[in-house]
Amino acid sequence: MEKLKKIDDLIVKHINLKKLGFRHLDYMMECNTGTFYRETKDKYDVLTYGFGYDYRLYDPITMSKEDGMRSYISFKSVEKILNSILPDPYASESFSHSWNFIFYCQQTLTNEMIPNINSPDELTHEIAYENGQILDENILKAINNMNVYIEHYHLPFFDEFLTIQDINDKILEKYDWMDWNDYFFKAPFFKAIIIMKLCRNNKKYDEFTKMYKSRIYDAIQEGENDNLYLVPYYENFLKVMDYLESGKYKELMV
């Protein structure tokens, strides 16, 4: 839709991310997502954004820095290993648009550093389009707010987790394993196992995998109602363990 593209073009022109080496993928109306990403040897820093609107009218269209922006990081080594064990039909290294890119990255670590917004009154909504008019002044004000928010909450997240060793030290070693699910997207415990293996965190790796294997196996033996989920999950867990113990993952190291 032309009005959304014009708003998106203004974001690309005035947001500070381009100066920091981020690339832009065009806004996708189908999933209300635009993407900026920065690629290094083993890592993607990713920030996505969207707009507020009624899908029936697209008038008005609003912008908000708090509930419209999300950031995460993806480590290629972790995602490659996981995809080699449990192939993802959506994974692709051809980034033609935002949705394709997001499926490929699968969010190794989600940004939990941004503050929780508890009330709509705390949100800074700017009306970008209303009554058939694009409101340039409001859009520029919203982008300025986005730049401040990015500097305060998103860039520090990217800087804090530069390597998988940072994830091992600041997440896996710091938090109880039952909380890991809050930080990882898709197969959180499999990713944690892979990271511990790559970081040679042998003590934590051995303790966790022994406990986790026993926990899943015992639940299956008890015949819980979710065995239809647990049995294939347990089989996938064994695949992850067999792959890592075989040393095949070393062939994929970046």
Image (tube, helix red, strand yellow):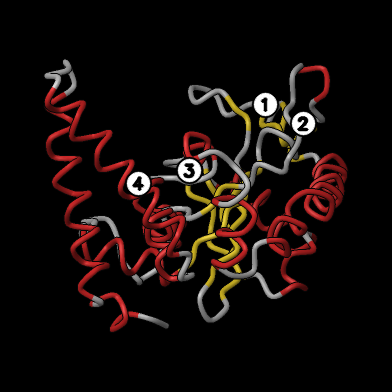
Determine whether, in the image, residue 180 is placed left or right of residue 121.
Answer: left
- Determine the CA span between mark 3 and mark 2: 18 Å
- Determine the CA span between mark 1 and mark 2: 7 Å
In terms of depth relative to the viewer, which is nearer, 157 or 169?
169
Q: State how many labels appear.
A: 4
Q: x, y (%) of residue 2?
A: 56, 48
Q: Which residue is mark 4?
A: 187
Q: x, y (%) of residue 42?
A: 50, 76
Q: Are marks 1 and 2 in contact (CB under 8 Å)?
A: yes
Q: In this picture, is 140 found above or below 182?
A: below
Q: Which-is-in-front pick, marks 4 and 3? A: 4
Instruction: Decide which of tag 4 and tag 3 comes sooner along the chain.
Output: 3
Q: Which residue is mark 1?
A: 60
Q: In which image quadrant can residue 160 be found?
A: bottom right
- Determine the CA span between mark 1 and mark 4: 38 Å
**Label 1 packing within 10 angstroms: few (<14), some (14-19), many (20+):** some
Residue 29 numbered tag: 3
The three-letter code of the residue at mark 3 reads: Met
Q: Are marks 3 and 2 in contact (CB under 8 Å)?
A: no
**Label 4 packing within 10 angstroms: few (<14), some (14-19), many (20+):** some
The three-letter code of the residue at mark 1 reads: Pro
Q: In this picture, is 140 found above or below 244?
A: above
Instruction: Decide which of tag 4 and tag 2 comes sooner along the chain.
Output: 2
Determine whether, in the image, residue 167 is placed left or right of residue 87.
Answer: right
Residue at 55% across / 59% down in the picture?
168
Q: Which residue is mark 2?
A: 127
- Determine the CA span between mark 4 and mark 2: 38 Å
Classify mark 1: helix, strand or loop.
loop
Classify mark 4: helix, strand or loop.
loop
Residue at 24% across / 58% down in the picture?
240
